[in-house]
Amino acid sequence: MSRIGKQPVPIAKGVTVNVSKGNLVTVKGTKGELSIQVDPNLTLDVSDTEVIVNRPSDDKRFRAMHGLYRSLINNLVVGVSEGFKKELEIIGVGYRASINGNILELALGYSHPFFFLPPDGISIEVDTKSSKNPRIIITGADKQLVGQVAAKIRSLRSPEPYKGKGVRYLGEQVRKKAGKSAGR
């Protein structure tokens, strides 16, 4: 058995899980509603407190899907009950971030600012008070979407290896390179 797949998915209080025909799993909670299409060969046993994913046989394909869909369903349950959060840190002289309405405005050392409109279900905050470097806090119920938005913002100016300037995840270690040596 898959170590991850055989574990039941605990259902938090205030969360409802429905499985419709064709294995469409819909999870509703305080943070919203998410759904995922599970492979029709897998069977889902839903009780009041947990969801158990079962596979039909020990074929390699089913073993791979067993743990995958268990993790995806768990992410849905955690997302609609607690939500997910990613934090980015902006490092560099003159690099700034601000929120105008719901649009994120970034000044990242280019000749023009970047404007980023978050997708539905994602909220973005800018914290300039807690440290000398501004932080961008991305929250939402969908783990994949939160990670994708954070990666997109980071890609606008990823950290460079000489001075470490750019947008990085909070706590990310950037390996620095030595600069030119004054040879002769």
Image (cartoon, rainbow, N blue to C red):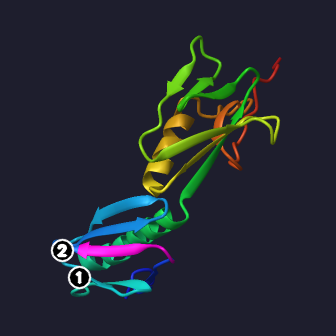
Image coordinates for residue 173, horizontal then vertical, percent? 70, 47
95 displayed left or right of 20: right
Distance between mark 1 and mark 2 Cα atoms: 15 Å
Q: Amino acid at mark 1?
A: Asp
Report helix, strand or loop for mark 1.
loop
Q: Residue furthest top?
A: 111
Residue placed at 73% from the left, 38% from the top?
A: 176
| Residue located at (44% from left, 56% from top) | 142
Which residue does the numbered mark 2 point to in the structure image? 40
* Residue 15 lies within the magenta run: yes
Q: Is residue 87 left or right of residue 25?
A: right
Query: Which residue is tagged 1?
Result: 59
Q: Is residue 42 above or below residue 143?
A: below
Q: Is residue 66 visible?
A: yes
The residue located at (57%, 13%) in the rendering is 112
Closer-to-camera residue (86/80): 80
111 is higher (above) or lower (below) than 99: above
In depth, the one of 173 and 113 nearer the eye is 113
Is residue 2 visible in this depiction of the protein? Answer: no
Q: Which residues are magenta?
A: 13-19
Q: Residue 126 falls in which quadrant of the image? A: top right
Q: x and y percent of residue 61 in the render?
A: 25, 74
